[in-house]
Amino acid sequence: MFEGAAAVLRAWAVVPLLAVALVGCAVTPESTPEPTPDEAVSLADYALAPGDRVRVTVWGQPDLTTEAELDAGGQIAMPLLGAVQAGGRTAGALRDAIAERLDARYLVNPKVAVEVARYRPVFVLGGVERPGSYNYQPALDVRRAVALAGGYSADTAVPAVTILRGETEGRREIAGHPDMVVLPGDVIEIGRSRR
């Protein structure tokens, strides 16, 4: 009789150990990688670059309102002003530069608004079904970019994600993860590994 009771007690003694082991395997929000300061760039800080398209509105001056794509040198053409350097500036900094130039020669205290009409595309390469360029959408993350590219390819198991960010000079590699926010012009490389 005592042998059966001892076996039951031994079985129940394992339950707390299993519970502790399972809790240790749980994924908690704290284990999700936090973005580094380099990754946590918002569109408010976004520097315009060739391929972006901006809409410039000068209030009360419809002839000065224009939409233009930044050329290879990062410039846009503006009525009256000609070439204006937009590359490397935020939309707010470009607004201020245009207003300053208009105020200096043509208008008194001009009200200017600049918004990005279309961002540069993002590129999804490597272990996806349809590698290529895709239109940028605000709040785009790696997971959604991979979905736009048709999902992971059949030969991709646990993918390694690398993001190339910035212009050719000064471009940097960032180790990515599925929830990482993507910026216009980013190149997302999905590494392949056999299942």
Image (spheres, rainbow, N blue to C red):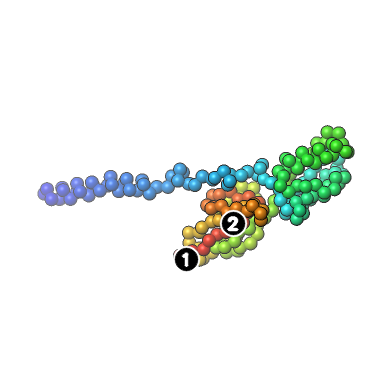
**Which image quarter holds the C terminus?**
bottom left
Residue 58 vs residue 147, the one in the foreground: 58
Q: Neighbour class for label 1 at 10 Å: few (<14), some, many (≥20)? A: few
> Three-letter amino acid code at disc 1?
Arg
Which residue is located at x 47 percent, y 66 percent? 194
Q: Position of residue 108 (x, y in %)?
A: 86, 34
Residue 120 seen in this snapshot: yes
Q: Quadrant of residue 104?
A: top right
Tell which residue pokes out farthest to the left in this image.
Answer: 1
Q: Position of residue 167 (x, y in %)?
A: 66, 53
Q: Which mark is residue 26?
A: none
Q: Quadrant of residue 80?
A: top right
Residue 146 vs residue 100, the one in the foreground: 100
Q: Position of residue 177 (x, y in %)?
A: 52, 52
Which residue is located at x 82 percent, y 49 percent? 83
Which residue is located at x 28 percent, y 45 percent? 16
> Three-letter amino acid code at disc 2?
Ile
State the residue position of label 1: 194
**Which secondary structure lies at badge 1?**
loop
Instruction: Please give left or right for residue 48 compared with residue 37 in the image.
Output: right
**Which secondary structure lies at badge 2?**
strand
Which residue is located at x 58 percent, y 54 percent? 173
Residue 118 seen in this snapshot: no
Please say if the residues under marks 1 and 2 sit with CB atoms less than 8 Å apart: no
State the residue position of label 2: 188
In the displayed structure, 97 sits above or below 160; it is above
Residue 82 vs residue 150, the one in the foreground: 82
